[in-house]
Amino acid sequence: MASNWYYEENGDRKGPVDSKTLKRLADNGTIKSTTSVWREGMKDWVNAGSVKGLLPVPHKPQSRPVRPKIAKTQSPIAGDEKGLANDIEHETPIKPWHKWPIVALLVTCCFPVGLVLVWKHPRWTTITKSLWTGGFLVIVITGQIVSHFEKAAVAEKLTQAEEHWEADRKPEAINIYRRLIDRDILHVDTEDRPLLFERTVTFDAENGNTEAAIKVLDNAEMFGVTLAFQSEAAREVVAIREQQKEQERRKREEEERLAELTRQAEKRDRDTQRSTRNVVRLSQRELLHFIDHTSEYAGKTVSVPLEYGASTGLRTGPDNVLIPFRGMALTTGGSYSHFDIKIRFSSADPVAKFDSLNDLPNVVGSDDVTVTFYCENGSLTSGNRAVTIDRR
């Protein structure tokens, strides 16, 4: 945290100011070498010239700057403020990629960029940068040595397995192959990998262990190893695995299809429920526009005066029933134009505001009613879903 400083100017004591502001006042000449300054923790006021790092170093052509020697009596001032220079340095922001965790990550994962950032770091000394570089080289060299010994151990195991195989001790060879596939496949040379997988699959297939053979096939596919089998049993296992993969693919597609249908149905229900909150109420004069331009009402909820047209009463019919209605639209000439419309009544419909048909009026014959329905398709014959019905 920056220190609180005080200084004298024209006989007046001013402050507090932080270290950065004090340095700026010294740079612009407000604070001179004879100006008295003081900060908390100092015994007495001192001349600004005795504070290390405060005043700018004067430019002397053709001469090297000489580091001033500070007397022992002044050591508390210099030590107290190591003083100002450290405060000013710590107030200077650095880029996020110069923070050591980011540098460490880039040095490890992105070798050239990481080392460039190490040597471009604005605060680290040459010794620090050299230590970072040396540490990275130690890690790389150690990794190479470990990898060399691991590959040597894998090569020895492959030799042992080959000896077992040639001596017709196939179970012993397969045990070695299986351990290499499960644990050390990355240390097996690319050209040697097909042999391990092919022999292991063939051995399991010929001994009736189809499940184990399929597991090895999946591992080979995961590591991108291409296999070719001479054994009929192994080829049969490959065919079984292909059938399983096809079934899995179809199952995924079906699950995705059903999930998409569910999402669409949920969206449709949400849209429908939002629509039922904004009912378009049509008079007999407005019905003429409705029957001539029904498609414009698709996705809207409308309330229409109609005449019940079923031969049986509404309550006596089954749930989820399509009921015919007849309407009369008033024309501009004062006459009536008749039209027919079909509306489905279902208590299970999300838009329905009734739990069963018994909750509705006992409409029969040619009763005059007002039907509120969701016009899903913009059609007089399909997609009309009842919200409620009232007598007129």
Image (cartoon, rainbow, N blue to C red):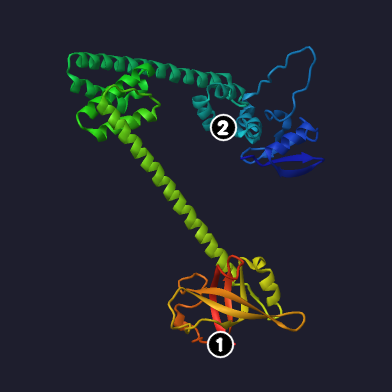
| Mark 2 residue element | loop
Q: Is residue 304 left or right of residue 181?
A: right
Residue drawn at 48 percent across, 55 percent down = 261
Q: What amino acid is found at the position of numbered circle 2 in the picture?
A: Lys
Q: In this view, does 120 lie to the left or right of 345?
A: right
Where's residue 366, x and y in %?
55, 86
Q: In the displayed structure, would residue 361 be above or below residue 64?
A: below
Q: Say which of 244 and 130 sits in front.
A: 244
Q: In this view, does 14 lie to the left or right of 140?
A: right
- Crowd rating for badge 2 (residues with CA inside 10 Å; few <14, some 14–19, many 20+): few
Residue drawn at 64 percent across, 28 percent down = 74
Q: What amino acid is found at the position of numbered circle 1 in the picture?
A: Asp
Q: In which quarter of the image is residue 54?
A: top right
Q: In the displayed structure, would residue 232 be above or below residue 63?
A: below
Provide the residue designation for mark 2.
99
Q: Give the quadrant of the C terminus.
A: bottom right
Q: Give the quadrant of the N terminus.
A: top right
Provide the residue designation for mark 1.
367
- Tag in front: 2 or 1: 1
- Crowd rating for badge 1 (residues with CA inside 10 Å; few <14, some 14–19, many 20+): some
Q: In the displayed structure, would residue 127 be above or below residue 244?
A: above
Where's residue 303, x and y in %?
62, 77
Q: Distance between the residues labelled 2 and 1?
A: 82 Å
Q: In the displayed structure, would residue 311 be above or below residue 243?
A: below
Q: Say which of 227 and 295 sits in front.
A: 295
Give the label on residue 48, or none. none
Residue drawn at 80 percent across, 35 percent down = 30
Where's residue 175, x and y in %?
22, 24
Residue drawn at 34 percent across, 39 percent down = 244
